[in-house]
C-alpha cells in the first residue's frame, strides 16, 4: 500500500508537500550492538545445573517408570485365556526364556555395579589446646600494643572487631604468638601444625578404635601454611600409614577447602571399597597472625579481619559400605 503523501502528490502534482529533514547523529553511523545477557552470571543457571545433575543421576529410574507403567497397562488387558496361551508359548520356547532371563540378570547386575556406594561418617574430633593457650580480649589487645607495630587507629579498629566478632574470653592462640615479643618462625609453625593435627587424629583414633594401618585415604587441607615436606607427609610418617595410602594435601583454598576435602574423600571412596578415609582440616596462625597484620594493617582493614580470625584443627573419619 502506498504512503498517504505519495497518493496526494499523484492527485495534485503541482501541490508541494512539506518534508522534514533531521540531522543524522554520530551514533547512528556506528553499528548497533545488541548485547546478550550473560547467562553464566544468572542465578537460574544454578537450577539448570542441579536439574541436569538430578536427571543424569536418576536416569535409570526415569526410564524404568514409564516402561513399568506401559507394561502394567498392557498386562491389565490380558485375560486368563491370554495368560494361559502366553505360558504355553514360553514353556515350549526355551531360547526366549533364556534370553529374557539373561537380560534381566544383566540389567540388575549393571544397576548394582554402577550405583554410587554409600559413604558414612564414622566419627569426628576437634583439637582443644591446653588452658595455658587461652587468650582473652584484654590479653590480645595488650599483646598488640606491645608489638608497637600498630597505630591508634589500627588498635581501635581491632578492638571494635573483637567486640563484634563473637570470639569469647576462652579463645586459644599458639604459644609463639603469646610470647613477648612474638616469635613467628618456621619451627614454631611446624610445632603448632603437629600439635593440632596429631592431637585431633589421636582423639579420633581413640574414639573409633580404627588402626592407622586401616586408613587407605588421607586428605589434609590448610590454606596459609604449606611447608615441604607437606602436612599430609607429616601425618603419614608420624602414624606409619601403609605404603599404598592415597595422600592428598590441599592448600590455598580458603575456608571452602573443608567441604572440598570431604567431597574428594567421598569420590575416592567410590573406587576404594572397604576402606577408611581420614580428612584433616586445619589452619596455621603462627606465621600469619602478627607479621601478616603488621604487613597489611596500613593498607587494608579487610586484611586485618582476614588474618585475625583463623581456625585450627579438626579431623573426620569416613567409611564406604
Image (tube, grey):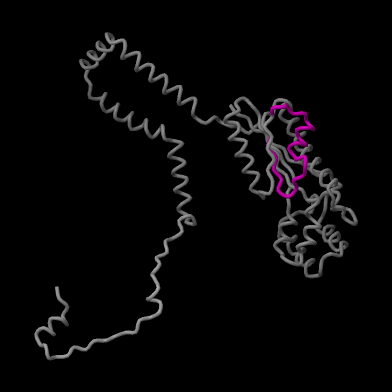
Residue 76 vs residue 153, the one in the foreground: 153
Question: Residue lying furthest right in this view?
Answer: 180
Q: Please identify the quarter of the rendering in which residue 74 is found.
A: top left
Residue 112 vs residue 190, the one in the foreground: 190
Q: Position of residue 149 (x, y in %)?
A: 84, 64
In the picture, the quarter occupied by the C terminus is: top right
Q: Please identify the quarter of the rendering in which residue 264 is found.
A: top right
Q: Position of residue 282 (x, y in %)?
A: 72, 44
| Left or right relative to 15: residue 62 | right
Q: Which residue occupies 46% across, 36% down? A: 57
Q: Which residue occupies 78% across, 32% down? A: 237
Whether 178 is among the magenta residues is no
| Left or right relative to 240: residue 47 | left
In the picture, the quarter occupied by the N terminus is: bottom left
Q: Which residue occupies 76% across, 67% down? A: 298
Question: Residue lying furthest front in this view?
Answer: 29
Magenta residues (range) = 218-244
Q: Is residue 123 visible?
A: no
Residue 174 vs residue 131, the one in the foreground: 174
Whether 224 is among the magenta residues is yes
Q: Position of residue 263 (x, y in %)?
A: 60, 39
Q: Which residue occupies 69% across, 29% down? A: 245
Q: Is residue 32 visible?
A: yes
| Left or right relative to 18: residue 289 | right
Question: Residue lying furthest top in this view?
Answer: 92
Q: Is residue 310 above or below residue 220?
A: below
| Left or right relative to 142: residue 122 | left
Q: Please identify the quarter of the rendering in which residue 136 is found.
A: bottom right
| Count of numbered circles in the view | 0
Amino acid at each position: 500500500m502506498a504512503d498517504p503523501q505519495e497518493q496526494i502528490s499523484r492527485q495534485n502534482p503541482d501541490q508541494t508537500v512539506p518534508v522534514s529533514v533531521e540531522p543524522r547523529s554520530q551514533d547512528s553511523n556506528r553499528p548497533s550492538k545488541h548485547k546478550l545477557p550473560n547467562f553464566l552470571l544468572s542465578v537460574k543457571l544454578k537450577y539448570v545445573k542441579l536439574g541436569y545433575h538430578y536427571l543424569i543421576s536418576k536416569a535409570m529410574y526415569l526410564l524404568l517408570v514409564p516402561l513399568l507403567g506401559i507394561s502394567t497397562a498392557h498386562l491389565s488387558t490380558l485375560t486368563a485365556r491370554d495368560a494361559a496361551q502366553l505360558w504355553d508359548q514360553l514353556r515350549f520356547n526355551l531360547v526366549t526364556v533364556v534370553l529374557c532371563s539373561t537380560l534381566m540378570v544383566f540389567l540388575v547386575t549393571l544397576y548394582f555395579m554402577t550405583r554410587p556406594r554409600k559413604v558414612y561418617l564414622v566419627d569426628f574430633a576437634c583439637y582443644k589446646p591446653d588452658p595455658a593457650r587461652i587468650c582473652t580480649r584484654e590479653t590480645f589487645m595488650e599483646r598488640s600494643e606491645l608489638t608497637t607495630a600498630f597505630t591508634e587507629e589500627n588498635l581501635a579498629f581491632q578492638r571494635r572487631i573483637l567486640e563484634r566478632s563473637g570470639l569469647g574470653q576462652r579463645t586459644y592462640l599458639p604459644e609463639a604468638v603469646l610470647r613477648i615479643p612474638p616469635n613467628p618462625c618456621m619451627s614454631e609453625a611446624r610445632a603448632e601444625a603437629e600439635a593440632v593435627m596429631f592431637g585431633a587424629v589421636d582423639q579420633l583414633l581413640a574414639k573409633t578404635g580404627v588402626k592407622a594401618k586401616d586408613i587407605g585415604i588421607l586428605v589434609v587441607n590448610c590454606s596459609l601454611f604449606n611447608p615441604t615436606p607437606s602436612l599430609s607427609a607429616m601425618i603419614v610418617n608420624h602414624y606409619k600409614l601403609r605404603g599404598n595410602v592415597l595422600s592428598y594435601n590441599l592448600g590455598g583454598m580458603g575456608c571452602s577447602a573443608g567441604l572440598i576435602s570431604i567431597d574428594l574423600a567421598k569420590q575416592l571412596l567410590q573406587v576404594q571399597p572397604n576402606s577408611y578415609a581420614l580428612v584433616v582440616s586445619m589452619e596455621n596462625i603462627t606465621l600469619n597472625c602478627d607479621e601478616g597484620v603488621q604487613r597489611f594493617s596500613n593498607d587494608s582493614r579487610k586484611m586485618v579481619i582476614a588474618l585475625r580470625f583463623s581456625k585450627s584443627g579438626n579431623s573426620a573419619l569416613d567409611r564406604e559400605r
